[in-house]
Image (spheres, coloured by chain):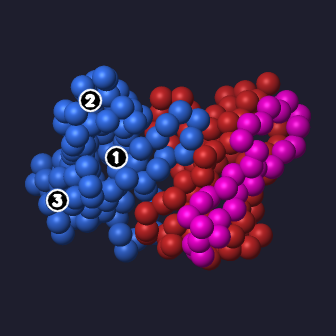
Amino acid sequence: DQQVKQNSPSLSVQEGRISILNCDYTNSMFDYFLWYKKYPAEGPTFLISISSIKDKNEDGRFTVFLNKSAKHLSLHIVPSQPGDSAVYFCAAMSLGTASKLTFGTGTRLQVTL
Amino acid sequence: DTEVTQTPKHLVMGMTNKKSLKCEQHMGHRAMYWYKQKAKKPPELMFVYSYEKLSINESVPSRFSPECPNSSLLNLHLHALQPEDSALYLCASSQDQNEKLFFGSGTQLSVL
């Protein structure tokens, strides 16, 4: 049972444009969400997170939006750069419990020149 | 120091070998994790140590044996692995068990 889903396995965006990566979750107990970026043969790198008490969090070119009623979050990258080409994982957890971080299946982003 | 260091980066072993993966962090984090990642799949949790005690074992086969000698070190002892155990093994740490994780670069393991 995949509790965190990223339905787009890949996305191609032109340099300078906006990249929008989507993530859906089914477990209503999740209240903390994270995005990780991963290059091949490397460990995931933390990008940005959001708590369920917020609907938006911004950090430079990266913004995460959370829609709790739809159980949906998205990561916006503006402007997209070639170095952003990587696999992006959405992850979710329940704070305050000894729960594990559940990862989505990942979206491979390619930023073209 | 915001790094999680894993050694070795690559490991090839036979099914009868015994080897160990090592992980080290000096961020004062009290939770450490082992994840396994197969190609084109998300990382899958194997073990969690919290304050040097095993707190989660995700029904991992006994041929994988974790060890936390101290708060900075985490080992994964491997014995009698199968070819299907070939994967990227990731170590991670966090300030506490419910905080964001910092990952190492992983050990790419091939079992022949």
Q: Can see residue B50?
A: no
Q: Nearer the viewer, mark 1 or mark 2?
A: 2
**Label 2 sits on what residue type?**
Glu
Chain ID, red in image: B
Labels 1, 2: one chain:
yes
Question: Is residue B34 found left or right of A33 in the rendered image?
Answer: right
Marks 2 and 3: CB-CB under 8 Å?
no
Report the quarter where the N terminus of chain A lies: top left
Whether callout 2 and callout 3 share a subunit is answered yes
Foreground residue among A31 and A20: A20
Query: Residue placed at 55% from the left, 54% from the top?
Result: B103
Percent across and percent down for residue A34 are 34, 55
Mark 3: amino acid = Lys
Magenta highlight range: B1-30
Residue highlighted by disc 1:
A90
Describe the element under mark 2 as helix, strand or loop.
loop
Is mark 1 in CB contact (under 8 Å) with mark 2? no
3D distance between C-alphas at marks 2 and 3: 24 Å
Quadrant hosting residue A68: bottom left
Magenta stretch encompasses residue B8: yes
Provide the secondary structure element on which disc 1 rests.
strand
| Mark closest to the chain's N terminus, 1 or 2 | 2
Whether residue A49 appears in this view of the structure is yes
Secondary structure beneath dot 3 equals: strand
Mark 1: which amino acid? Cys
Residue B73: x %, y % from top left: 72, 66
When the figure is inspected, residue B68 is found, relative to residue A16, above or below; the finding is below
> Residue beneath label 3, please?
A56
Chain shaded blue: A
Disc 2: which residue? A15
**Distance between the Cα atoms at labels 1 and 3?**
15 Å
